[in-house]
Amino acid sequence: MSESTVGSTTESLDAGATSSDDASTLPLTGERTVPGIPEENYWFRRHEVVYRDLLPRCADRRVLEAGSGEGYGANMIADVAAKVTGLDYDVSAVAHVRSRYPRVEMLHGNLAELPLADGTVDTVVNFQVIEHLWDQAQFLRECHRVLTTGGELLISTPNRITFSPGRDTPLNPFHTRELNAAELTELLIEAGFRVAIMTGVHHGDRLRALDAKHGGSFIDAQIERALAGEPWPEDLTRDVADIGVDDFALRESDIDASLDLVAVAIKDPVK
C-alpha cells in the first residue's frame, strides 16, 4: 500500500480538505500500488490476494490499517469489519481515501508514533509497508501497544531472498530494509508478539507458465520494459492485464522461495 509513511509528526487533517481530483486514481510514484493502471495490474493483484485471503481475520473487528495508501485495501476490509481506521503519512493519500472510500475513518500520522490509545484496536493490518520504515522495531512496538490482548497484527513484506537476491541493500530505492522470514520473525518476537503463521505468496500455475514464456521471469520482463521507457509489446500488455488474484497462492511451505512474506502475529496476555 502506501509507503510514504515515515515522518516526524502526527497531526489531523481537516476532514474537508479535499480537491476535485481526490476520487481519481492517485499517481504512481513507485512507493505504492494503485488500482486502475493496466501496467501495474500484476503488482496490484499480488497485493490484493493477501487482503482477500486474510479478510476473514478482520470480520467484526476494529481494524487499523497502518500505511493505507490508496485505500482500496481498507475499503475491502470495511466489507467485514466492525470499524476500519486508515493511517498514512502522505497528505494526498489521506485526502484521496476520505473522498473515495467514506467507510474508512482516515487519519494522518506517523507510523513510529501511532495516534491511538493503548489497547483500542483488535487487528492491525500492515501490508507492503514495513520495508520502507527506518525504525521497524519501533513501529512493531507501537502495533503491540495499540492492540487489545489477543489482538492480531497482519503483516506482509517482500521476501528479501527473492526480491533483492544476493544483495546487502534493496534493489528498490524506496526500501530501507528488506527481510527474510527468519528476520521478520525475530523482529516480531522482540516486539512482544507470538508468530502464529508465517506464510508466503507464490506464483500459481498460470504465472509459472508466463515466467517461461517471457524469458524465465515474468517480473523481470515487466521491469525491463518499464525501465526502457518505451511502449510495451502487445503480448506482455495483454498478459499483465489478464492477471487475477487466483493466479497467486499463499502457502507456508518453501517459505524462502516466496515472493512476499505474510505473517499473523498475536499479542498474548502478559504472564
Image (cartoon, rainbow, N blue to C red):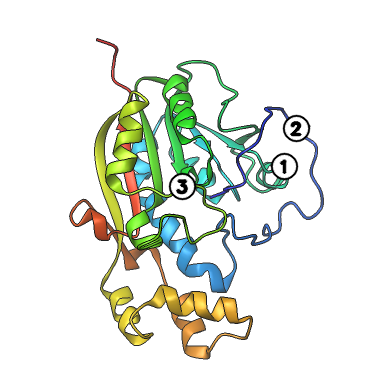
Q: Residues within 10 Å of mark 2 (few under 14, many from 20)?
A: some
What amino acid type is highlighted by mark number 1?
Val
Residue at coordinates 47% horizontally, 64% vertically from top-left?
Answer: 43
Asked whether residue 242 appears in the rendered view, the answer is no
Secondary structure beneath dot 2 equals loop
Position of 253 relative to 125 (above/below): below
On the question of residue 172 being in view, the answer is: yes
Mark 3 lies on residue: 177
What amino acid type is highlighted by mark number 2?
Answer: Leu
Specify whether 231 is left or right of 210. right
Residue 246 placement (x, y as % from top left) = 33, 65
Query: In the visual, does 225 lie left or right of 270?
Result: right
Tags 2 and 3 touching, CB below 8 Å: no
Number of numbered discs overlaid on the protein picture: 3
Classify residue 23 as left or right of residue 186: right
Residue type at mark 3 is Arg
Task: Report if the CB atoms under discs 1 and 2 are less than 8 Å apart.
Answer: yes
Q: CA distance from mark 1 to mark 2?
A: 8 Å
Q: Which residue is mark 2?
A: 13
- The x, y position of residue 87, in whole percent, is 59, 36
Quadrant (top left/top right/bottom left/bottom right) for the C terminus: top left
Q: Residues within 10 Å of mark 3 (few under 14, many from 20)?
A: some
As drawn, 267 above or below 167: above
Residue position marked by numbered label 1 in the rendering: 91
Report x, y in % for residue 58: 39, 36
Q: Report the side of 15 relative to 180 (left or right).
A: right
Q: Are marks 1 and 3 in contact (CB under 8 Å)?
A: no
Query: Is disc 1 placed on a helix, strand or loop?
Result: helix
